[in-house]
Image (cartoon, rainbow, N blue to C red):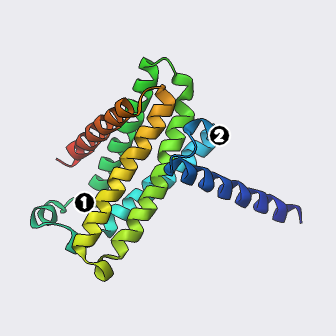
Amino acid sequence: MRQFRSRSFLLDDMKALVSLFWQICLLRRGPEAVPVATGLLGLVVVADLTLSLLLAFSVPDALLTEEQLAATSVTPLAAIASLLVSQATFAALIWFATHIRKCVGRFPATITAYFGCDIIVTLVMIIVVQLTSLLGADIVRALMLVIVIWSLAITGFILQRTLSTTTFVALGIALGMQIVSLVMGAGVTG
């Protein structure tokens, strides 16, 4: 019986955590509400990386242009390396921003919130990509653009709360971080 209770407790904790990340994605709660624990951060990062890889390998050819199709000859190992570099770069940039603003103590909760929200955004993208045959490639591309903008808004919101800055500045920082991390990740694959 005791083992059942501990599993139930863990399930309740996971539900609460997913609910918290969802509330952050809706811009209702900030990263300061995220519990700080190394194990939790590790779990969230691994889950995010796993789902991001699943998304990368599940994009149907119908969504890609001829140039993108030609460039998709990247090996799975190179894709993993690219994703790892991109995510590590983003984490380093968040640390750098908290260091500059003298709020490094907020880094663990911020990075956990970022990766946790990215899990939700990635899950939404996976679902949308799977609807390509039903909705058509053009509608799915438009939805993906909306999701990317939503993701940028979430990151900007997290950075605004963490860095105690304005929304406009936080969105600019988020956009810059995204560009730098994507360029760094793409540099791995050539």
Q: Note whether 25 is above or below 170 in the view shown.
A: below
179 or 51, which lies in front? 179
Q: Is residue 66 left or right of residue 92?
A: left
Q: Which residue is mark 1?
A: 75
Mark 1 residue type: Thr
Look at the image and tell me whether residue 128 can be seen: yes
Expressed as whole percent of the image width and height from the top left, the position of residue 54 reads 39, 64
Q: Is residue 188 left or right of residue 108?
A: left
- At x 66%, y 58%, the residue is 15
Q: Which residue is mark 2?
A: 35
- Distance between the Cα atoms at labels 1 and 2? 36 Å
How crowded pointer 1 is (Cα within 10 Å; few <14, some 14-19, many 20+) is rated as few
| First along the sequence among labels 1 and 2 | 2
Mark 2 residue type: Pro
How crowded pointer 2 is (Cα within 10 Å; few <14, some 14-19, many 20+) is rated as some
Expressed as whole percent of the image width and height from the top left, the position of residue 139 reads 26, 71
Expressed as whole percent of the image width and height from the top left, the position of residue 41 reads 56, 43
Q: Is residue 72 left or right of residue 169?
A: left
183 or 133, which lies in front? 133
For this orientation, the residue located farthest to the bottom is: 134
- At x 32%, y 66%, the residue is 57
Look at the image and tell me whether residue 50 can be seen: no
Tell me, for residue 124, which label it has, or none. Answer: none
Quarter of the image with the N terminus is bottom right
Expressed as whole percent of the image width and height from the top left, the position of residue 118 reads 45, 51
Tag nearer the camera, 1 or 2: 2
- At x 82%, y 65%, the residue is 4
- Quarter of the image for residue 75 reads bottom left
- Secondary element at image label 1: loop
- Secondary element at image label 2: loop
- At x 44%, y 26%, the residue is 165
- Quarter of the image for residue 183 reads top left
